């Protein structure tokens, strides 16, 4: 008996990433937001993320991360529509 494999939609994949990210540390969720926003992490982003990680462990002053949220991911039209990765106003 053959098993059927259904390719997940882009909406399903992005929803899975957003859901998975909720269990990650805030600095990692912030890194995901930066990737969704700009497509890559700059050296300045790495420095900022390092500071966020240090702050989370009490090794530097308090910092606030801007974690990935559904507002940073928008999909228009489930069937053949366009995919929009936005910054969610951040």
Image (tube, rainbow, N blue to C red):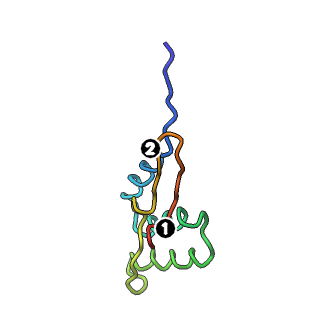
- Residue 21's place in the image compared with 80, above or below, is below
- For the residues labelled 2 and 1, the Cα–Cα distance comes to 19 Å
Q: Residue shown at 45%/78% (left/top)?
A: 54
- Considering the image in quadrants, where does the C terminus appear? bottom left
- Residue 10's place in the image compared with 42, above or below, is above
Between 47 and 74, which is closer to the camera in this rendering?
Answer: 74
Between 78 and 62, which is closer to the camera in this rendering?
Answer: 78
SS for dot 2: helix
Q: Which mark is residue 87?
A: 1
Q: Which residue is mark 2?
A: 12
Q: Residues within 10 Å of mark 1 (few under 14, many from 20)?
A: some
Which of the 4 image quarters holds residue 72? bottom left
Residue 5 percent across, percent down from the top left: 50, 27
Which of the 4 image quarters holds residue 24? bottom left
Residue at the limit of the structure toward the top, as seen here: 1
- Residue 10's place in the image compared with 73, above or below, is above
Between 78 and 90, which is closer to the camera in this rendering?
Answer: 78
Q: Residues within 10 Å of mark 2 (few under 14, many from 20)?
A: few
């Amino acid at each position: 008996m053959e098993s059927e494999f259904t390719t997940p939609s882009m909406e399903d994949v992005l929803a899975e990433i957003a859901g998975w990210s909720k269990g990650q540390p805030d600095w990692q969720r912030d890194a995901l937001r930066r990737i969704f926003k700009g497509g890559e992490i700059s050296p300045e982003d790495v420095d900022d993320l390092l500071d966020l990680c240090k702050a989370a462990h009490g090794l530097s002053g308090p910092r606030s991360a801007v974690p990935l949220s559904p507002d940073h991911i928008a999909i228009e039209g489930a069937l053949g529509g366009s995919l929009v990765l936005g910054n969610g106003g951040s």
